[in-house]
Amino acid sequence: MDVFTTASLHHVAGNPTKGQAAMTVLSPGDFEQAVAEITAWQGYEATPLVALDDLARQLGIARIDYKHEGPRFGLGSFKALGGSYAALRVLQRELSDRLGKDITLPDIRNGQYKADCANITLVSATDGNHGRSLAWGCQRFGAPCRIYIHAEVSEGRAQAMRDLGAEVIRIDGDYDASVALARDEADANGWFVVSDTSWEGYTEPPRDVMAGYGAMTFETCKALNQAPTHVFLQGGVGGLAASVAAALRQYWGDQPPRVVIVEPELAACLFESARKGQATTVAIAEETIMAGLSCGEPSEMAWEILREEASDFLTIPDSIVAPTVRLLARPQGGDPVVEAGESAVAGLGALIAARQSPDLSAALRLDENARVLLIGSEGVTDPDIFQAIMEGTTYG
């Protein structure tokens, strides 16, 4: 535990309110429609909710539940839910407009409009998992797919998207630069952006992405006997965290868990947004090992929810990521083996490090009664990186 004891975590308190964003930005109807569609997909099954009982005892808390998204549709991450569902909804809206009649999601899913979908190109920027989900959806629905990736996205993740039929465009800049290029080229060519981040005038696909994630959260809630006291959520642009926070509020009502947002210290746009009291973009000078969280610009729609629901914002150093991956894969005691990717373990790494600090534990109200929910957002999405982490040859 030495690396966790010496880790430097930064904390800023949120300002949760009794607002309505968790009910209006993402409505119960948005979640219900997404869950009904996704659970009808071929190959759907709930992913495991893993109890880490021995680790909880070691940390002096009551319970740790880890939602392991590695098996999700064979794509390795929770993003299989959001990108594919949002793609389906974009196609539904565009086909309904072009054909002058209401087109249903099952009709598109079942291939009735595959020839029409072939004339609708969907594009997005990604660090890997969202693009893989979009490519998978486009392959199933018959739509062309273009994915923009930044310089630091691994070749393994790029090839996984090509294998699903996507055209992959790599740029020299960072994630936010790839987002800008995807938008510009879509505007110039009449393509349709399917993004997990919102901006002024662009809200429907990001809302659909977040609604799709709701399938994961409602699976989790149904598997629990009582509400967790805490949920530690990865940051990124905020879509995952906002979706989970909203779904937890809708499910548990006035007794939702304390929402703790965790980000890399190298890409802490939500932390800075909380510190300044408004959505704030940060410059990324160095890429974090947590590739899926390397985002400098928060989603405005996600921030609407998080500013009302999140109690705490934490940043963590990259130094604790590889040890956390190894701890899950080589658990002490009787906990099950979990093979997870780098972005999946942000919440667990933060929890372990926080419990080494009495002051931070007190600030987060982490004690022997704490029941913590973690979202293990990805499995092994790049085998080469995972092997290097497990061998300790790189990444710490």
Image (cartoon, rainbow, N blue to C red):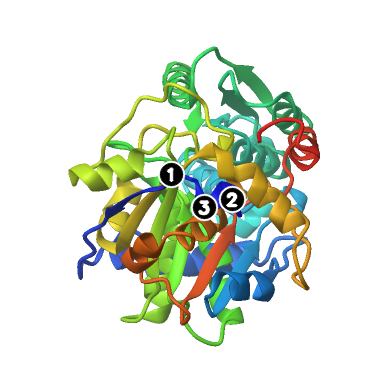
Q: In percent of the image, x 21 and y 60: which residue is there?
A: 15
Left or right relative to 160: residue 66: left
Q: Secondary structure at mark 3?
A: helix
Residue 281 spot, x, y in % from top left? 30, 32
Quarter-of-image position of residue 161? top right
Residue contact between numbered discs 2 and 1, judged by CB atoms under 8 Å: no
Residue 217 spot, x, y in % from top left? 53, 67
Please name the amino acid that badge 3 sits on.
Thr
Nearest the viewer among 274 and 133 is: 274
Nearest the viewer among 182 and 262 is: 262
The quarter of the rendered structure image containing the C terminus is top right
Q: Secondary structure at mark 2?
A: helix
Which labelled disc corresponds to residue 2?
2
Q: In percent of the image, x 49 and y 40: which residue is there?
A: 317
Q: Earlier in the sequence, mark 2 or mark 1?
A: 2
Neighbour class for label 2 at 10 Å: few (<14), some, many (≥20)?
Answer: few
Q: Is residue 201 visible?
A: yes
Residue 210 spot, x, y in % from top left? 46, 54
Which labelled disc corresponds to residue 217?
none
Judging by the rendered image, the residue that carries numbered circle 3 is 5
Residue contact between numbered discs 3 and 2, judged by CB atoms under 8 Å: yes
- For the residues labelled 3 and 2, the Cα–Cα distance comes to 5 Å
Q: As drawn, which residue projects farthest toward the bottom?
A: 225
The quarter of the rendered structure image containing the N terminus is bottom right
Which labelled disc corresponds to residue 8?
1
Q: Is residue 16 above or below residue 387?
A: below
- For the residues labelled 2 and 1, the Cα–Cα distance comes to 12 Å
Q: In percent of the image, x 62 and y 66: which residue is there?
A: 66
Please name the amino acid that badge 2 sits on.
Asp
